[in-house]
Amino acid sequence: MAALHAAASYMAYFPPQGQGSTSSDDPPAANPTSGFDLSDFIFFDEGSTPPTSFAQLGTGAITPQPATESAYAGQSSGRSVPASGSSTTSGIRAEVERPRTERIAFRMKSEVEIVDDGFRWRKYGKKSVKNSPNPRNYYRCSTEGCSVKKRVERDKDDPSYVITTYEGVHNHMSPGVVYYTTQDAASGRYFVAGCQIPPGSS
DNA sequence: CGGATTTGACCTGCGC
DNA sequence: GCGCAGGTCAAATCCG
């Protein structure tokens, strides 16, 4: 499993605009001030090289991959990574065959499963999964025209942790989050960080 | 009353 | 081909 320790609030890398439009959009704006303890892990596709520190993310050293199955690559059954099962073990091949859907998973310490990340989510399903005693909840972004999905479940090993997997990219800004963007002069890449607006301020 | 949630049924894909 | 597991749908229900 490719796990990444993240010690800081979320920051996402965005490629320069005008290219890679399918792979850049709103990050899951996890916010350490919104009542949960963003802790620690971001899971990437096994095919990608995990950075050794969260700071590497900020330098653009790592791009969130169109994950094959990020969060549970290590513990899910084989059927969760079908692309590599029938043809080749090459992650590159899997990337070609699967739809290019951004998928990023977080593991965070939280009392509650519903984390206010600034977006509005509508629950559309709940399913118990074989590898975990805890049910998995399925959410969709309730914004019209936005098809981003999110899966939330408690860590089977440590129920105090919640694993959130975002799938897809928002085609809109969060109604409750201000985004700060900077562009790296050397690479031309954009970095976006989310910061939630305190209630009542505007 | 409208929107969100719940929950069982259904669909799909993969392994055996 | 069959069974299993994950994901989604949709009707019923709940709640503000």
Image: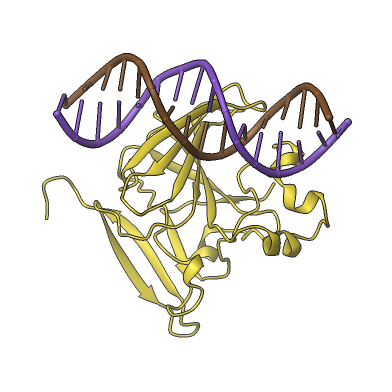
Chain colours: A yellow, B purple, C brown
Residue A79: image quadrant is: top right
Q: Is residue A179 left or right of residue A52?
A: left
Residue A75: image quadrant is: top right
Residue A32 x/y as whole percent: 36, 46
Residue A183 x/y as whole percent: 39, 78
A86 or A76, which is in the foreground? A86
Residue at x 19%, y 48% (from the top left corner):
A198
Residue A58 x/y as whole percent: 48, 66
Q: Is residue A145 above or below residue A165?
A: below
Residue A125 x/y as whole percent: 47, 31
Number of marks in picture: 0
Quadrant in the picture for the C terminus of chain A: bottom left
Q: Is residue A6 above or below residue C16?
A: below
Q: Is residue A164 left or right of residue A78?
A: left
Residue at x 46%, y 46% (from the top left corner):
A149
Residue at x 40%, y 39% (from the top left corner):
A37
**Residue A131 visible in rendering:** yes
**Residue A115 visible in rendering:** no
Q: Is residue A43 left or right of residue A167?
A: right
Residue at x 31%, y 49% (from the top left corner):
A143
A133 or A20, which is in the foreground? A20
A10 or A147, which is in the foreground? A147
Q: Is residue C5 above or below residue A99?
A: above
